[in-house]
Image (tube, helix red, strand yellow):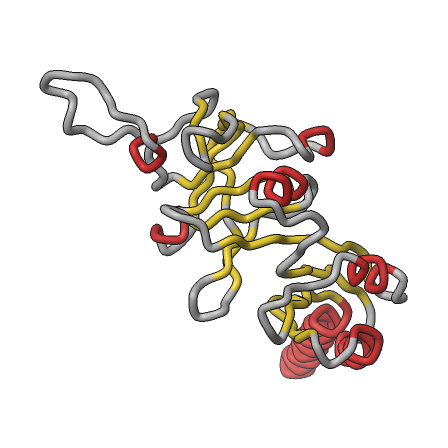
Amino acid sequence: MAAGRVGEVMRVSVAVILAFAALSLAARAWAAVVEVKSAGAEGVPDETATKAMAIKGIRKVERYLVIKAQPHEVIGVDPDARLRVLTPEGSVVEAKLESGKAFRKEDDGRNVAIVGSNVYAEDYGYRGTMGAMATMKHLLEVGQTFRLTGESGPRLRVLGTFSAKPEALAQRVFLPLATAQKLFDRPGKLSHLFLTTEGDTEALLKELKSALGSQLQVRVVSR
């Protein structure tokens, strides 16, 4: 009798494990984040976002404009987009908001920024104070302002700060997309799209590649 109960328990346990494995495989097939970028230097046409959103299974489109500025890379994003950092090797790391607040829809076009936790006021021209403290560097903090594009450029107010791993990735500045396009004179320009999908991921990838053309690269960055 006891042996029969043990056998039944084992059968139930195996069934539960198999069910969880099946659910895990289904989740990977039915939810993914897909990156779209240009195969060359010309960038992603703005109308690509509209084309992607028209495809069944695309739940959300997030537009990015990555600018190789000095001293730190600038990333323009849709105000409701997740803060993602692209590494030099091509991987994608999600940043974590550490203080302040995220962008809101009404911030698009405004002179506001979310800065990395390794971005200093001195990086953008701050000279500090005289005396013993003159050699110390000062992290940009929420509420402070700085000039991103030199003395002739507008002052940007820091809305929030973010962290990322490894820490070198926190040397970035996020701007609302329209703000980045305006400050760097790139109207309508994009460098990347991130698409949140649902459904058969492989079938969606094929449809995206067919709809968007060979000039754009499409790949899954997370499931």
> Which one is in front, 98 or 149?
149
Residue 117 locus on image (x, y percent): 38, 39
In this rendering, the answer to whether 169 lies above or below 212 is above
Residue 65 locus on image (x, y percent): 61, 53
Q: Quadrant of residue 203?
A: bottom right
In this rendering, the answer to whether 182 lies above or below 166 is above
In this rendering, the answer to whether 213 lies above or below 190 is below
Residue farthest to the front, as pictured? 152
Image check: 44 left or right of 174? right
Question: What is the total number of numbered labels drawn onto the structure image?
Answer: 0
* Residue drawn at x 81%, y 59% as measured from the top left: 47
Residue 142 appears in the picture as rendered:
yes
Residue 5 appears in the picture as rendered:
no
Image check: 29 left or right of 113? right
Residue 131 locus on image (x, y percent): 11, 16
Image check: 130 left or right of 33? left
> Which one is in front, 133 or 97?
133
* Residue drawn at x 79%, y 81% as measured from the top left: 206
Q: Quadrant of residue 192?
A: bottom right
